[in-house]
Image (tube, rainbow, N blue to C red):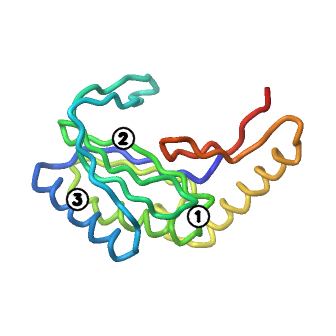
């Protein structure tokens, strides 16, 4: 349901990692977005490859940025091979937050040997505010339809890890 930006790829090298981290922190500072560094000795990241679920287990490092109180955190968390597979939902934050995140990700492209970004709002691909706005309007229409069924659905719900579940079914 929501307006989510999915992204994955592999950085070229350690220099690229350092550039992405420096740029991310500077960008967050410019926007007034709080952030914190990520440095874990061993974590499990749930990933998908070729439509198959798999887990990465090992060290990670990067930065987590909170673009807006009503968006998910933007996690730029890289594994030991400088690979990332993440997403961020933005539909409950102002449209400008979505646009700024896509611009940040686009600025990283030269640092990746491979990168794929799938923007459900299509702004990353089109740069067109009206296309993004149309997706947002459709999302909220659909959400309202679900939530109108008060005996069946409720939401949105923010999980402890900062992720947002748009709609949950009542038991």
Q: Disc 2 vs disc 1: which is toward the camera?
A: 1
Which element is circle 3 on? Answer: helix
Which element is circle 1 on? Answer: loop
Disc 2 vs disc 1: Cβ atoms closer than 8 Å?
no
Judged left or right of residue 96, residue 24 is left
User: Disc 2 versus disc 1: distance between alpha carbons?
Assistant: 22 Å
Q: Disc 2 vs disc 3: which is toward the camera?
A: 3
Mark 1 residue crowding within 10 angstroms, few (<14) / some (14–19) / many (20+)? some
Where residue 4 appears, x then y in whole percent?
54, 51
Which element is circle 2 on? Answer: strand
Disc 1 vs disc 3: Cβ atoms closer than 8 Å?
no
Q: Mark 1 points at which residue?
A: 93
- Please identify the quarter of the rendering in which residue 66 is found: bottom left
Judged left or right of residue 10, residue 35 is right
Q: Mark 3 points at which residue?
A: 21
User: Disc 1 versus disc 3: distance between alpha carbons?
Assistant: 24 Å
Residue at coordinates 63% horizontally, 72% vertically from top-left? 130
Tell me if residue 24 comes above or below residue 54 in the rendering.
below
Residue at coordinates 58% horizontally, 64% vertically from top-left? 93
Q: Name the residue under label 2.
A: 85
> Closer to the N terminus: mark 2 or mark 1?
2
User: Disc 2 versus disc 3: distance between alpha carbons?
Assistant: 16 Å
So how many labels did they put on this image? 3
Q: Nearest the camera: 43 or 105?
A: 43
The C terminus sits in image quarter: top right
The N terminus sits in image quarter: top right
| Residue placed furthest toward the bottom | 30
- Please identify the quarter of the rendering in which residue 110 is found: bottom left
Residue at coordinates 20% horizontally, 57% vertically from top-left? 111
């Amino acid at each position: 349901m929501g307006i989510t930006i999915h992204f994955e790829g592999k950085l070229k090298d350690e220099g690229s990692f350092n550039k992405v981290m420096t740029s991310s922190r500077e960008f967050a500072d410019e926007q007034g977005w709080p952030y914190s560094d990520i440095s874990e000795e061993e974590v499990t990241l749930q990933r998908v490859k070729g439509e198959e679920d798999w887990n990465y287990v090992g060290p990670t490092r990067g930065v987590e940025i909170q673009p807006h109180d009503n968006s998910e955190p933007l996690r730029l968390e890289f594994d030991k091979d400088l690979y990332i597979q993440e997403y961020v939902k933005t539909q409950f934050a102002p449209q400008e937050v979505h646009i700024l995140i896509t611009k940040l990700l686009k600025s990283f492209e030269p640092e990746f040997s491979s990168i794929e970004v799938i923007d459900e709002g299509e702004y990353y691909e089109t740069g067109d505010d009206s296309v993004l706005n149309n997706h947002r309007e459709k999302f909220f229409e659909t959400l309202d339809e679900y939530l109108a069924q008060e005996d069946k659905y409720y939401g949105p719900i923010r999980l402890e890890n900062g992720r947002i579940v748009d709609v949950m079914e009542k038991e």
